[in-house]
Amino acid sequence: MNSMDIHQILELLPHRYPFLLVDKVRSCEPGKSIVAIKNVTINEHFFAGHFPHHPVMPGVLIIEALAQTAAILTFKTHDHKADKKSVYYFVGIDKARFKKPVMPGDTLELHVEIKRFARGIWWFAAHATVDGQLATEAELMCTLRTIDSKTD
């Protein structure tokens, strides 16, 4: 049960403001599962346009927060840190469902579980809750790839 603060998360993920969507890891069991937190505030840049009269966190960003949480789990499982030679990609998203709007002031709890790993592809079951209520669920597929370092 490893918790992580923002400084430890920044060591693992290459994402930075405004695209870092994980604030804290509550627990992580490498090779199995992780629970992380995204504190949603009115100061988020996307609320200026989605929607000014009724701010709602875009569903694709909730999925991205789940994917970043999955990346942390992958990196902890393989004792890997973000570097300039690799990138963590989405390969697929299945069965995505949005059950409850996420609003400013909400604490989004991100749950990700490894389902399997084969041929460089990770499969995850993921869901996000607010106050114990399901907000979003999806099956995610991700992979870690080496970046071609050729220059022009």
Image (cartoon, rainbow, N blue to C red):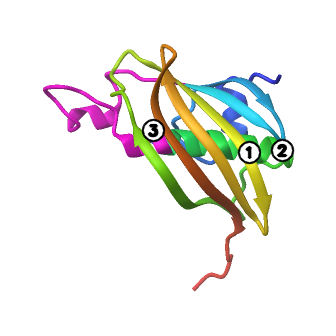
Please give the residue where the numbered disc 2 appears in the rendered image: 77
Q: Which mark is residue 114?
A: 1
Disc 2 and disc 1 in contact, CB within 8 angstroms = yes
Please give the residue where the numbered disc 3 appears in the rendered image: 62
**How many residues crowd mark 2 within 10 Å: few (<14), some (14–19), many (20+)?**
some
**47 sits to left or right of 127:** left
Please identify the residue farthest to the left as the structure is shown.
Answer: 53
Over which residues does the magenta segment extend? 38-63
Q: Nearer the viewer, residue 49 or 131?
A: 131
Spot occupied by residue 120 in the image (x, y as percentages of width and height): 76, 66
Question: Could you tell me the amino acid type at mark 2?
Answer: Thr
Residues at marks 2 and 1, CA–CA distance in whole angstroms? 10 Å
Question: Could you tell me the amino acid type at mark 1?
Answer: Ile
Spot occupied by residue 114 in the image (x, y as percentages of width and height): 74, 45
Q: Nearer the viewer, mark 2 or mark 1?
A: 1
Relative to 135, residue 112 above or below: below
Instruction: Look at the numbered disc 1 and give the secondary structure of its residue.
Output: strand
Label whose residue precedes the other's in the sequence (2 or 1): 2
* Residue 108 is inside the magenta segment: no
Relative to 87, residue 36 above or below: above
**How many residues crowd mark 3 within 10 Å: few (<14), some (14–19), many (20+)?**
many
Disc 3 and disc 2 in contact, CB within 8 angstroms = no
**46 sits to left or right of 75:** left
Q: Is residue 17 visible?
A: no
Residue at (83%, 37%) from the top-left corner?
30
- Which quadrant would the N terminus be assigned to in this image? top right
Label whose residue precedes the other's in the sequence (3 or 1): 3
